[in-house]
Amino acid sequence: MPQSLEDFKMKLRGAKRSANVRRVEEFLRLEPGSFDHIPHYAREAALSAIEDVRKLESQQAFRPGIYYIVLSDLSRATRTSATLGKDLNRYRVETFVLTCVESLGLIETTNYHHFLREIGDAALFVFSSFDDVLAWWRSMESWLQGRNKMWARNLSASQMREFNLEAKTVVHAGEVDYSGGSSPISLAVNQIFKMEKEFRPHELGISEIVRQAAYPILKSNRLNPRPLKKIFLPGATKSMQLFSAARWPRNAA
């Protein structure tokens, strides 16, 4: 029988919050204690990977320019916020965001990347190479499966059906800058939030701009983007074609 959520939380309480934990929580803009629900056997690796991302980004000043903008959104977040309860829903969102950023620290990137911020139940990144986007997306989807297996050992079957972590990931391209604070200033960032609604869980969606810019990389990875529909994006004078570039297999290892 799966143990109760309270038993699970009690088992994980009591570990001292190290300076490393506090730095990572601040970097991700998460509440103190956001790592408490991750088992000790998985917590150290997660912290190490995210700390690597934090250190790398602290050494590389963000430079305004044209980037691949990546939004990974947690599916069914509105529904599960009502069905799971406050605590378990918060754990779901935190586990998702942590996994998205952790996955960035588990791959060898070839070019510049930057974790922009966590936005509610989504994570926003910029990459200068589509090769790195693909490597991160595959890593993230694989690690989400691992996190689902971890949580399945501690939740009932009905809870797990609601909790199950699934991502919709979309890639757009455009100019990105900052204008004080931590919020990116970009028309493409505004546009990508409308694009995300057109895709399904486990899907990697791209815009026509990305399809053209990343065509050699898509081809070398044997990806043939499938056209979906055209939509009007904020600030655009004509419709934009959207494509499904890839879909993560549910039975992938």
Image (cartoon, rainbow, N blue to C red):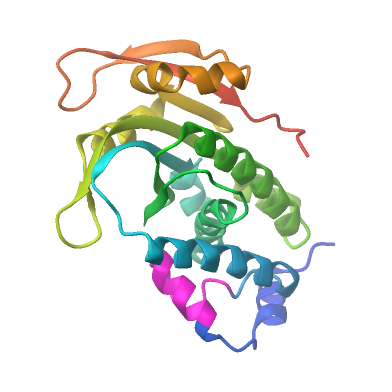
Please say if 7 is above or below 190: below
Quarter of the picture containing the N terminus is bottom right
Residue at (59% x, 63% y) in the render: 49
Residue at (31% x, 59% y) in the render: 61
* Residue range corresponding to the magenta coloring: 20-35
> Is residue 168 magenta-colored?
no
Residue 120 appears anywhere in the view: no
Please say if 27 is above or below 66: below
Depth check, front residue: 19 or 87? 19
Residue 191 appears anywhere in the view: yes
Depth check, front residue: 213 or 110? 110
Measuring from the top left, give residue 33's x and y in whole percent.
Answer: 51, 77
Quarter of the picture containing the C terminus is top right
Measuring from the top left, give residue 215's x and y in whole percent.
Answer: 47, 17
Measuring from the top left, give residue 237's x and y in whole percent.
Answer: 14, 16
Please say if 155 is above or below 233: below
Residue at (46% x, 65% y) in the render: 54
Dividing the picture into quarters, in which one does residue 249 lie? top right
Left or right of 28, for residue 176 = left
